[in-house]
Image (cartoon, helix red, strand yellow):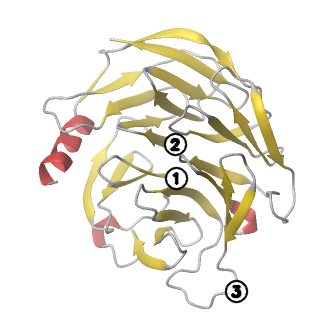
Amino acid sequence: MKNKVYMLFLLIVTIVNYGQNLIPAGEIGSFSSARSFSINPYGIIFVSDDLKNEIIKLDTLGNVIKTIGGYGWDNSSFDNPADVFANVLNVYVADKNNNRIQIFDKDLNFLSQISTQNSADERFAFKYPSSVATSNQGDFYILDSDNQRILKFNLRGEFISEIGGVDAGTFRLTNPLKLSLDNNLNLITAEKNTLFIFDQFGNGIRKVPLPFEVKNLNSLFNNIVIVNEKNVLAAKVVAEPNLQMNLLNPNITEDIVDACVFKSKLYVLTGSTIFVFQLQH
């Protein structure tokens, strides 16, 4: 495990401007104000649109399969869906201004929600959740933007631990933007131009300086993608030496909102569409 973590650090701190060319492969989707997206292992894309308060499900050709949402506080309604995360079975939405996480099946049928508004226990009470992710072990993580920390819960919704809170020392978070997990179950978040890496138990592993201020980050399988408005840092998280993170410039006029690598393609989300690029070594 230590070797795998060490190789991840080599990967992150070795940044180059070459290694992969981007070949435009089209655009998919049309959105009002896309905020985040997630691609599940089957290639189905879920996009959160915070202007329409919607979650849109698309295939990789851009065909809209289903749309849910609209402004509100009932089940399947949203007030600022700040983040969406999809795995094989479920879709999780950080319904920020409703102070809850809504959980759907892969067909966007409502299953349940997680909210701590009625809890007086400050250890796990969260407000304005801005990001959510789950591990392949069933644990899920919520970015509590009101208290600037990450909370870990088990599959049953029971609180496990706080990560990056006031007791985290030099790994205390002050303005985390997004959270994600790599294949080794390391928890990754970012604020300003620094990447924070924690192990699955919430122990701080390392802080990594980045060449730009981070706007968003995403991961799928063994790929981590970090973006600002114009650039993309893409890396493979594998336990091999001398790997490099590629600094890519998609050269699009719209600001980049999010990005993800899936099956040798780079998907770049803007407020209005998804640009697709073939990655060529």
Q: Residue at x 79, y 58 (%)?
A: 79
Element class at badge 2 = strand
Q: Residue at x 84, y 44 (%)?
A: 52
Q: Disc 3 vs disc 1: which is toward the camera? A: 3
Q: Earlier in the sequence, mark 2 or mark 3?
A: 3
Q: Residue at x 73, y 49 (%)?
A: 108
**How many numbered marks are there?**
3
Residue 230 appears left or right of 274: left
Q: Quadrant of residue 267?
A: top right
Residue 129, compared with residue 82, is above or below; it is below
Q: Earlier in the sequence, mark 3 or mark 1?
A: 3
Residue 2 appears left or right of 246: left
Q: Quadrant of residue 18?
A: top left
Find disc 2 in the rendering and name its residue.
Answer: 216
Marks 2 & 3, CB-CB < 8 Å contact: no
Badge 1 crowding class, 10 Å Cα cut-off, few under 14, some 14 to 19, many 20 or more, is: some
Marks 2 & 1, CB-CB < 8 Å contact: yes
| Residue 165 screen position, x and y as percent | 41, 73
Badge 2 crowding class, 10 Å Cα cut-off, few under 14, some 14 to 19, many 20 or more, is: many
Hey, what amino acid is under mark 1? Answer: Leu
Residue 200 appears left or right of 5: right
Hey, what amino acid is under mark 3? Answer: Asn
Q: Earlier in the sequence, mark 2 or mark 1?
A: 1
Find disc 3 in the rendering and name its residue.
Answer: 118
Q: Quadrant of residue 55?
A: top right
Hey, what amino acid is under mark 2? Answer: Asn
Say which quadrant the C terminus sits in: top left
Find disc 1 in the rendering and name its residue.
Answer: 177
Distance (Cα) linking label 2 and label 3: 30 Å
